[in-house]
Image (spheres, coloured by chain):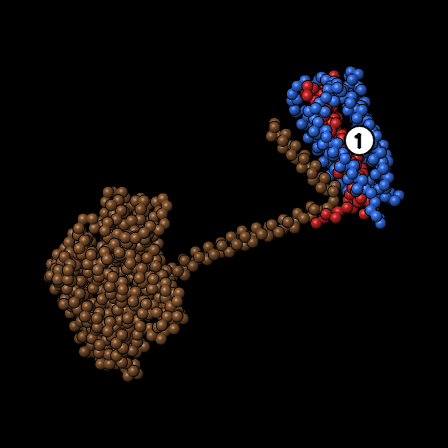
Amino acid sequence: MIPINHFLVLSAIIFSLGIYGVLARRSAVLILMSVELMLQAAAINFITFAVYLAPGEFRGLIFAIFVITIAAAELGLALAIVLRIYRNKVTANVDEVDMMKW
Amino acid sequence: MTVEEGVFYVIAGATVIGALGVVVARNVVHAALFLILALLAVAGVFLLLAADFLAIVQILIYGGAVTILVLFAMMLTRARDMPQALDGPQRPLAALAAAAFLGTSILAIVSTEWPGETEVITRIPIEDIGEVLFRDWAVPFEVASLVLLVALVGAIILARSEEGE
Amino acid sequence: MGINDAWLLPLLPFAAFAVLLLVGKYLPRRGDWLAIGAIVAAFVLFIPLLADLLDNFDQPGFEELARSGWGWVEFGDFNLRLGFFFDPLAAVMVAVVTFVGSLIFIYSTAYMQGDPRYGWFFAVMSLFVAAMLTLVLADNFLLLYVAWEGVGFCSYLLIGFWWERKSAAEAAKKAFITTRIGDIGLLIGIILLWREAGTFDISEIFRFAEEGGYSTEYLTLAVLLLFAGAVGKSAQFPLHVWLPDAMEGPTPVSALIHAATMVVAGVYLVARTLPLFQLADPVALNVVVAIGLTTVMISATMGLVMTDIKQVIAYSTINSLGLMMVALGAQQVTAAIFYLFVHGFFKALLFLGAGSVIHATDKQEIDDLGGLQDKMPVTALTFGIGVFAMAGIFPLSGFWAKDEILHAAGAHLNWVVLAVLTFSVFLTAIYMARLYILTFAGRPRNEHVYQHAHESPPLITAPLIVLAALSLVVGFWAFDQVGEALGFPGGIGEFVFLVGPESFEFPVLAAVTSSIAALAGIAFVYGLWRRGDEPASLLARTFPTIHKILRNKYYLDDAYQWVVNNVVLLIGGIIAWFDRTIVNDTGVNGTARLGVLTGFQLKFWQTGRLPNYALAIVTGVIVLALVFLSVRA
């Protein structure tokens, strides 16, 4: 049997890598891919808790289903926005899009 | 080390490698490929957690649709063959933040007394998932489908070319 | 019309003030007739009230009957009531204020004629009369204090009536600030009394004190603080310095406010609260006597050397006030109030007479006057009567009143006080006689002034005549027979008293000694005059240092000025610095600048770039996570 902490640590690592990616990458698409990683880690967490700690009611599983669903929807919209910005500014690099500056 | 643990470490390793690849690759296409690896490895993790339905869902949606989506977006937004750094100026701070977060998380994980049995994985049969999904969670289910519809329509509107563009 | 209609008395002049203030300049003659009408009406109204009072004041249940008024502000222990109480003491005060006031108002129509602020004069005088009447009729300390401040304010306005003259503006300021020092004492005293008794009502506080509600030390302190107010308002030492300067105001003002009425408010206050003084430690009454006596002596000595006719009369007023305080210190309310009553007449007479001289000659300094009795016979004669009354010559009113006080000092205090008072009688006779002789008798010192001098118009001389006649006769009210003939139960002793009615006994010893002293003084001056000399020059030649000290008013003004310059202004400067630098620059401006600076520095965080914002979010999450972890642990 695998102890619960293994999965939790795994998801923590994935999440941290996702954070690094979000903060360090320039291209919007790459950032969105990192966000996907973070969502994956969250889903792993939900399922872990559901399966280990509350198998009678499996809300974690249901939640993970919804996480996947919403993540996909969000990714679609986000990429549409990135395309839009690219069309206006001919760049998908987030540090060149600073129209909301002081 | 039992067989289970060994399998776990292999799949976990694949996931981590995939994730690492996404965030440090020099080439966007490589990054996308690494993402596919990570997503599929996560499906494996789901299998290890005895959530077979979710593993299939993961492969279908992520491995299929999301990957295509990402690749398409990448193609449509490639800068014109200009070699540019893929990493922004925040790299050191980002590494620091990520490390800090990791540290905090692991601290939280190991210092928490998880209530309940922490060693046993219970498989949840798919019939039960279906029942609960369409009965107790029917409203969120419908709302989720609405969200998908909205996202779909929204993406189309946002992404299509205006007249004269 | 009964004694519970006493509230009408202050209302009439107050209404006159309000009307004059608002529409005065549109009325014919600027509305002086309205002011005069109001105060005369108040006097006329007083008469049936007095009749009703005489019927009732010695009956049981009088206290309830004498009250009138309305509640105004009430919450908890704090009760400001417009309450009025008409008893014999108040009646005497009202009589003086309304009668003498009416004469002075009539006099002012001629004296102030042609002044650009003629209407304003009558407006403020009406307000003053209203406030003074409220003061003497008030049945609770809070209303009394409000009226007290009111008369002080009117005094300020009227002293500085010709404020274009810097000396007048300064004098007004000095009067206000000096009396303010006393007023603070009065206010604290009132608050102390209220604090324990839970009420401002004077009768209730008396009952509370009699039942022992206050400890002796507490009551003594409160009573001494009340006396501080009297010291300021009645120009007792050391707060007497404002009264001579107050002569900058128009002469009718000096006559009404600084002779007959406002300055006696302090005497009235002590007389009214004397029951509390009796319950307090004897040191309180001793303080009253001591201060009164000091006042008597310094004013008498200073009056000798002054050369402005109004100033000499001002010092004589301070002298008289000191005498009244000594009488009160001997717990002789009858003597003090009797003197207050007659003093109102002859002191007003003296001031109005001086005003007549000023009106005719435009001069106030003795050096410019002299020999005026040929040119201004009526003024000279009436002024002479006033001088004799002040000096206490038989059978004028001043004689009877002064003797009552001397008798009281001898019988109830000690022979030292009596000796000092007798000496002051001597000095008073000297300086009053000197004043008359140098102003009216002998050869004119300024021919030009003499040529142009003429008797004043009837509106000025008529009040003088009335007041002179009264100064001759009101003293006889001391006699029981006279009082009964007028409808009183007896002489003044049967009407105004502290413990019980006092029938009149002729004080032989006091009469004899005071008459000798007064006549000696007058003879002394006359003798010097025949030799072409006068007392002040004699003093300057024989004791030049003393003369110098007296001329400089014992250097008290200089002392006060030194304190103001070095202590008050210093503290004020520090506080001003504090307010300017710390409160304003650092507190107010500094806070504003801090906000602007912080905003300016912080705006650079809005880079507009997504990664920076994401980093901020992640940092926040980490911090929160750590916080939750530590809290949970």
> Disc 1 marks which amino acid?
Ala
Label the brown chain with its letter. Answer: C
Q: Nearer the viewer, residue C75 or C226?
A: C75
At 34% from the left and 69% from the top, the residue drawn is: C31
**Image location (x, y in percent) of residue C188:** 34, 50
Determine the image quadrant of residue A18. top right
Determine the image quadrant of residue A9. top right
Please give left or right for residue C473 compared with residue A71 in the image: left
In the rendered image of the structure, the colour used to display chain B is blue
Label the red chain with its letter. Answer: A
Image quarter where the C terminus of chain C lies is top right
At 81% from the left and 33% from the top, the residue drawn is: B66
**Number of numbered tags placed on the structure image:** 1
**Image location (x, y in percent) of residue C175:** 35, 63
Q: Nearer the viewer, residue C353 or C89?
A: C89
> Mark 1 sits on what residue?
B19
Residue C238 seen in the current view: no
At 17% from the left and 62% from the top, the residue drawn is: C401
Q: Chain of mark 1?
A: B
Crowdedness of circle 1 by 10 Å Cα count: few (<14), some, many (20+)?
A: many
